């Protein structure tokens, strides 16, 4: 049986990660206009909010300050700030004395779960199946399946909305040579996203290989190193990057994560943008200096009584192919880029800290594909207000969250821009500028040719935010 909700929403969010949760929190705080409030609903197929549960390693911290919560950088007076969360938990004074600017990942997850548990209009256990444009009603149709606690289909539903916010996030990326191994259950070859669920099994392996030089790879390697006995570590850490490099964290370097740089990046030609993102890998794929220091300190400590730890740390390496040896081991065929040399490595377990890729829209947005305008690489075109560019016959708007790196740059997945982007979306959506934003956010002037930044005009005249006759 299909439940149908005829009263249309002003905004429906697909996916409830930190970015759409930020949007939900800031939209909930909008003041009433007459008898109307912004009508929103957010859907996610998971049973509850989960933020990278496989990487909530004890002691691992965020790489952004606690001010990069869901709302503060747009509305410090919001009831959904991290500081207000601490107040409700009666932990404000302990946090004050702890003098922590970068909080633990587990604490950020707990904060988001606190917000998600109190905000209305969040529908977990609802899998969105399809999105279509209904030209007769001038509305988007959103079909979903309500799931029971076991993840089985319980009921079908459909809702209508004037606008959408796409926040389906990214999926763990497994390189092609390792995909068959990751799908085979006999030898543990797992993505770092599933590390904690498989930690005991990984620790039980005689030799473990970590692949990937980013923050996740460093945290997994450090956790394994601390858990292995001195002299019998049997750990290998491989990276494709030319070095185990620190993340760019200088004050002016961080200005690449400001709205000023985002606007500059969006104004560049598509080929220039495509060259820039991979060249800026140290802005978003490096390792924070504290983690590098902790790894070196742990390795150094193991030399105090003579000898070296049984570890191999080698950057500049790619995995060409891989295969199983019998049923208990994996053989990795390696190539060193600078040397031009090749080698083989036999290991008992592999942790892939190989990052994430944007989820494809093919299935979910098949009904909108004829209306979507795409770039030369077949990616959705997204304007400077985070709106997917659609055929003019579509009067509704699709906003994109964490799916616009090709148009908005390295700050796209950064938590520090979450509240700002949510505020920009709501300002555009309502045309009321409920969250005034600064005209300038960086000391750096990006580019010689300055483009005047103008405040957004109302996106559409679809929202019931005025008194009705």
Image (cartoon, helix red, strand yellow):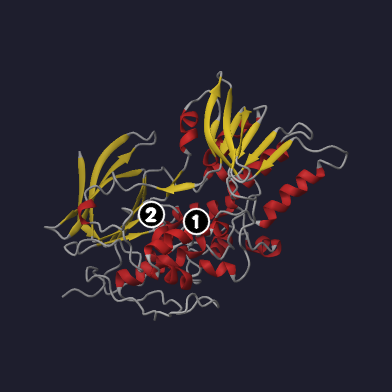
Labelled pair 2, 1 in contact (Cβ < 8 Å): no
- Residue at the extreme top of the image, as rendered: 326
- Residue at the extreme left of the image, as rendered: 136
Q: Position of residue 269 (x, y in %)?
A: 38, 66
Numbered label tally: 2
| Mark 2 closeness class: few <14, some 14–19, many ≥20 residues within 10 Å | many
Residue 241 is marked as none
Q: Tell which circle, 2 or 1, labels the residue nearer the N-terminal end.
A: 2
Q: Position of residue 309 (x, y in %)?
A: 78, 37
Can residue 50 be seen here? The reply is no
| Mark 1 closeness class: few <14, some 14–19, many ≥20 residues within 10 Å | few
Which quarter of the image is occupied by the C terminus?
Answer: bottom left
Q: Which residue is mark 2?
A: 167
Q: Is residue 411 above or below residue 17?
A: below
Q: Is residue 296 above or below residue 268?
A: above
Which quarter of the image is occupied by the N terminus?
Answer: top left
Residue 278 is marked as 1
Point 31% across, 60% down: residue: 381
In the figure, residue 286 lies in which quadrant? Answer: bottom right
Q: Position of residue 349 (x, y in %)?
A: 60, 30
In the drawing, does residue 71 fall left or right of residue 332?
left
Which residue is nearer to you in this view: 459 or 451? 451
Which residue is nearer to you in this view: 162 or 398? 398
Label 2 to label 1, Cα distance in Å? 23 Å
In the drawing, does residue 146 fall left or right of residue 95?
left
In the drawing, does residue 159 fall left or right of residue 453?
left
Camera-near label (2 vs 1) is 1
Q: Is residue 169 above or below residue 26?
A: above
In the figure, residue 307 lies in which quadrant? Answer: top right
Q: Position of residue 91 (x, y in %)?
A: 63, 59
In the drawing, does residue 451 fall left or right of residue 95?
left
Point 44% across, 54% down: residue: 116
């Amino acid at each position: 049986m299909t439940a149908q909700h005829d009263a249309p929403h002003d905004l429906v969010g697909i996916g409830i990660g930190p970015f759409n949760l930020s949007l939900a929190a800031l939209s909930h705080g909008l003041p009433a206009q007459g008898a109307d409030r912004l009508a929103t609903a957010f859907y996610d197929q998971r049973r509850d909010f989960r933020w990278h549960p496989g990487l909530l390693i004890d002691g691992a911290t965020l790489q952004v300050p606690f001010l990069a919560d869901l709302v503060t950088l747009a509305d410090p007076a919001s009831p959904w700030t991290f500081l207000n969360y601490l107040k409700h938990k009666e932990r404000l004074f302990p946090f004050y004395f702890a003098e922590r600017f970068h909080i633990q990942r587990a604490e950020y997850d707990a904060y988001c779960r606190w917000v998600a548990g109190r905000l209305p209009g969040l529908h977990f256990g609802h899998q969105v199946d399809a999105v279509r444009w209904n030209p007769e009603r001038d509305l988007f149709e959103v079909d979903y399946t309500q799931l029971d606690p076991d993840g089985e289909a319980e009921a079908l539903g459909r809702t209508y909305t004037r606008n959408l916010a796409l926040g389906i996030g990214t999926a763990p990326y497994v390189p092609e040579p390792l995909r068959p191994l990751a799908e085979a259950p006999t030898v543990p070859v797992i993505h770092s996203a599933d590390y904690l669920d498989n930690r005991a099994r990984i620790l039980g392996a005689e030799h473990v290989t970590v692949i990937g030089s980013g923050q996740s790879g460093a945290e997994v390697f450090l956790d394994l190193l601390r858990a292995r006995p001195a002299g019998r570590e049997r750990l290998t850490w491989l990276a494709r990057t030319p070095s185990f490099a620190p993340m760019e964290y200088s004050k002016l370097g961080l200005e690449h994560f400001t709205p000023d740089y985002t606007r500059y990046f969006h104004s560049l030609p598509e080929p220039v943008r495509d060259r820039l993102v991979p060249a800026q890998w140290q802005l978003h794929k490096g390792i924070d200096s504290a983690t590098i220091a902790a790894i070196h300190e742990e390795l150094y400590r193991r030399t105090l009584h003579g000898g070296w730890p049984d570890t191999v740390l080698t950057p500049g390496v790619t995995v060409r192919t891989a295969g199983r040896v019998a049923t208990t081991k994996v053989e990795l065929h390696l190539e060193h880029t600078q040397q031009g040399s090749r080698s083989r490595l036999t290991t008992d377990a592999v942790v892939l800290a190989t990052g994430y890729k944007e989820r494809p829209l093919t299935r979910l947005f098949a009904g909108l594909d004829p209306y979507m305008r795409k770039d030369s690489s077949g990616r959705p075109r997204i304007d400077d207000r985070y709106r997917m560019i659609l055929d003019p016959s579509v009067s509704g708007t699709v906003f994109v969250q964490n799916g616009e790196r090709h148009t908005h740059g390295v700050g796209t997945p950064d938590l520090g821009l979450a509240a700002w982007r949510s505020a920009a979306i709501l300002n555009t959506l309502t045309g009321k500028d409920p969250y005034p934003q600064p005209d300038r956010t960086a000391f750096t002037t990006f580019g010689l040719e300055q483009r005047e930044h103008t405040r957004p005009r109302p996106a559409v005249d679809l929202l019931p935010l005025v008194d009705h006759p």
